[in-house]
Amino acid sequence: MVDRTPLREADPEVFSIIQQETERQEYGLEMIPSENFVSEAILEACGSVLTNKYAEGLPGKRYYGGCEVVDKVEELAIDRAKKIFGAEYVNVQVHSGATANQAVFESFLTPGDTIMGLKLDHGGHLTHGLKVNFSGKHFNVVAYGVDKESHRIDYDEVLSLAKQHKPKLIISGASAYSRKIDFKKFQDIADEVGARHMADIAHYAGLVATGDYPSPLPFTDYVTTTTHKTLRGPRSGMIMAKPEYAKDVNRSVFPGLQGGPHMHTIAGKAVAFGEVLRPRFKEYSKKVIANAQAFSEALIKEGLSVITGGTDSHVLLVDVRPADITGKLASELLDQIGITANMNTIPYDPEPPRVCSGVRFGTPALTTRGMGVAEMGTIASFVRQTLEARDDENKLESLKSDVKELSKKFPLYSHRLVKE
Ligand SMILES: *Cc1c(COP(=O)(O)O)cnc(C)c1O
């Protein structure tokens, strides 16, 4: 319980907003697959005096004085990341997943070059070639999709497109693809056509760390990731690459794209990587997947349809058309009762992207707060009841209190809430 804090004294307005958000996280069910909850230790590191320090350059080679202490934390983060992923080269300075990708592009591509990535509406990410993103504006994008029947990546299509268009870069990885990706096959295709391969494991990194999802290391040219999704660290990014690309990637991050690295976030990443290296994280990762699979099976029992019939990871894409509803309305109703997920296109979606036929769910955050397979069944039933109760405000109110009751059984940051 927080009574007096420096922020509360100095700026009650911002303090109150943070309280409201703490409450929202505490009493809702967070099922956005790209979100997670960091530990108190990580919060402390990210809120530390390291935010004050300028440290342009790399450890031991900075453009500012007084970096001898922060050097140690960056080296620690790098060493731990190398250990987790078996990487030979790591850059922990990139501010986010999008910047990590941009830094790789900028390290060897020139505008107009051809790149290949998974279509956004088939599960790809905007930095993999969307028209309104830098990746789609500056480069000639050839997008591959998933198979119309199986909804899985069609490697023969990837190969034939690659042969036809001779891209300089092939991107693997996705934001809404629940099945295992064959990163080795992508690298082989890239090698065959003389392209480089970047595996963007932003979503899967935590599961890759424990061996529960295939690793693209050590054979992939570049591996990028966020650190805040399944990896459960602070909001940030990271690049791994073959050592021969190290110099160009470093220069692309700084001075190419960024100024000073955020040393407080790098400290947070070091703490997160320390957590990943402990045995408990291995258990966590297995539970995340078991929960996603249990949730998927439960939703199917409740009459909904899951793309590819299930999941190999933390994420699942639900086709809500069997409930005679759009993705947009479904996600709005769920939000109303305190289940946070997001509308998402399904492959070959008949609806436009702003309406969609799908909802994307994930289990990393709920698993962090200790929920298990039993709770997944309960939540799947909440989901079905919510979609059915679309015009019944009383029923929705009662579901909302059910959600709150369930969340109260799994305290998260309740000690941070001020009791009025
Ligand atoms: C989330 C995500 C990113 C971007 O991460 P930000 O930190 O939001 O910039 C990049 N690639 C993929 C595949 C993602 O899912």
Image: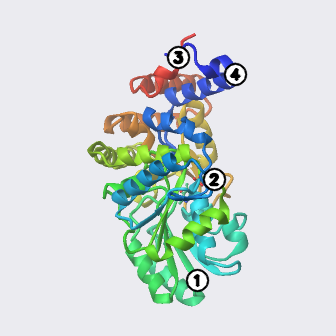
Tag shown at residue 260? 2
Q: Earlier in the sequence, mark 4 or mark 3?
A: 3
Q: Dot 4 corresponds to which residue?
A: 11
Tell me: is circle 2 under 8 Å from ligand 1.
no
Secondary element type, mark 4: loop
The answer to whether residue 150 shows anywhere in this view is yes
Q: CA distance from mark 4 to mark 3?
A: 15 Å
Position of residue 269 in the picture relative to residue 371 (left or right)? right
Residue occupying the point 50% across, 75% down: 245
Q: CA distance from mark 1 to mark 2?
A: 33 Å
Position of residue 287 in the picture relative to residue 251 (left or right)? left
Q: Dot 1 corresponds to which residue?
A: 167
Q: Earlier in the sequence, mark 1 or mark 4?
A: 4
Give the residue type that dot 4 points to.
Asp
User: Is disc 4 surrounded by few (<14), some (14 to 19) or many (20+) residues within 10 Å?
Assistant: few
Between 184 and 322, the residue placed more toward the observer is 184
Image location of residue 358, percent across then percent down:
55, 52
Q: Earlier in the sequence, mark 1 or mark 2?
A: 1
Give the residue type that dot 2 points to.
Gly
Circles 1 and 3: CB atoms closer than 8 Å = no
Residue 80 found in image quarter: bottom left
Tell me: is circle 1 under 8 Å from ligand 1.
no
- The residue most toward the front is 65
The answer to whether residue 377 is above or below residue 169 is above
Give the residue type that dot 1 points to.
Pro
User: Is disc 3 surrounded by few (<14), some (14 to 19) or many (20+) residues within 10 Å?
Assistant: few
Mark 2 or mark 3, which is nearer to you? 2
Residue occupying the point 40% across, 62% down: 179
